[in-house]
Amino acid sequence: MLEVSGLKVKYGEVEAVKGISLSVPRGSIVVLLGANGAGKSSTLNAIAGLVPATGKVTFEGELLSGQPAEDIVRRGISLTPEGRRVFPSLTVAENLHLGGAAHAAGEVLKGRIEAELERFPILRERYHQKAGLLSGGEQQMLAIARSLMAAPRLLLLDEPSLGLAPLIVDKVFDLITDLRSKGLTILLVEQNAERALEVSDHGFVLQSGQVVLQGTGPELVRSDLVKQAYLSE
């Protein structure tokens, strides 16, 4: 579904992503692992058209490189950013509307909102509350729901469990597997390597902006590099 070839991202003189290549098959969960500063978020942001990049990004056979972010969303890719980044002064309802307003209207928009409220019952309870008053876990649910309002075929998830309580982390990973079971393809960046590898079909390990290891979830779990750097004893 997604092919990335020779992707490079620079911030001034700093090269954050150094020519990485990866692929995401349709219907799969692919995880990017790596320490802070490895280039994981920059990779997602480049795919989503949020930062300038060189190299080639192809989605469903069509070239995305150089396309503006809004066109990439219309093509079927949504990003849930690291840190959630909901609009705190707007209500849950308004956040959801913003996620879908550019891609749907009328009954279609209403139907998408209702689908997300069914998926995340807590958002129905908080529907008229300002997003800034939600707990961290509730904000994460809202951020994912807002991304899904665009009806993507590929979801880019950046650190969805970051800073959440263990019980909420369980719910996040249950959600990820449920979304895949419903046909959504997911490219996941996640510090919780153990949980990420449990749900992923394939993974890439990044160090200093380069892919240093790749394999299936079970293969990476058995890797000495992954065990030493990312998995607890």
Image (cartoon, helix red, strand yellow):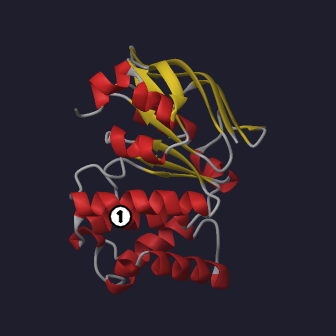
Circle 1 is placed at which residue position? 171
Instruction: Please name the residue shown 30% across and 30% down the image.
Output: 230
Residue 54 position, x and y percent, is 59, 22
Residue 49 visible from this viewpoint? yes
Residue 36 visible in the snapshot = no
Foreground pick, 72 / 195: 195
Horizontal placement of 7 versus 222: left or right?
right
| Residue at the right extreme of this rendering | 61
228 horizontally vs 28: left or right: left
Q: What residue type is labelled 1?
A: Lys
Give the residue drawn at x 41%, y 27%. Answer: 222
Q: Quadrant of the C terminus?
A: top left
Relative to 81, is 228 above or below? Answer: above
| The N terminus lies in quadrant | top right
Point 64% across, 83% down: residue: 106
In-image side of 45 versus 208 (left or right): right
- Looking at this rendering, what residue extends furthest in the top direction? 13
State which quadrant residue 139 falls in.
Answer: bottom left
What residue do we see at 46% from left, 80% from top?
117
Residue 129 location, quadrant: bottom left
Q: Which of 137 and 99 is in front in this view?
A: 137
Q: Which of 81 and 204 is in front in this view?
A: 204
On the picture, is 146 further left or further right than 3? left
Q: Where is residue 51 in the image (x, y as percent from the top left)?
A: 49, 34
Camera-side residue: 109 or 175?
Answer: 175
Which image quadrant for residue 182?
bottom right
User: Where is residue 18 drawn, in percent x and y?
Assistant: 49, 16
Secondary structure, mark 1, is helix
The x and y percentages for residue 53 are 55, 27
Characterize the local packing of mark 1: few (<14), some (14-19) or many (20 or more) Cα atoms within 10 angstroms.
few
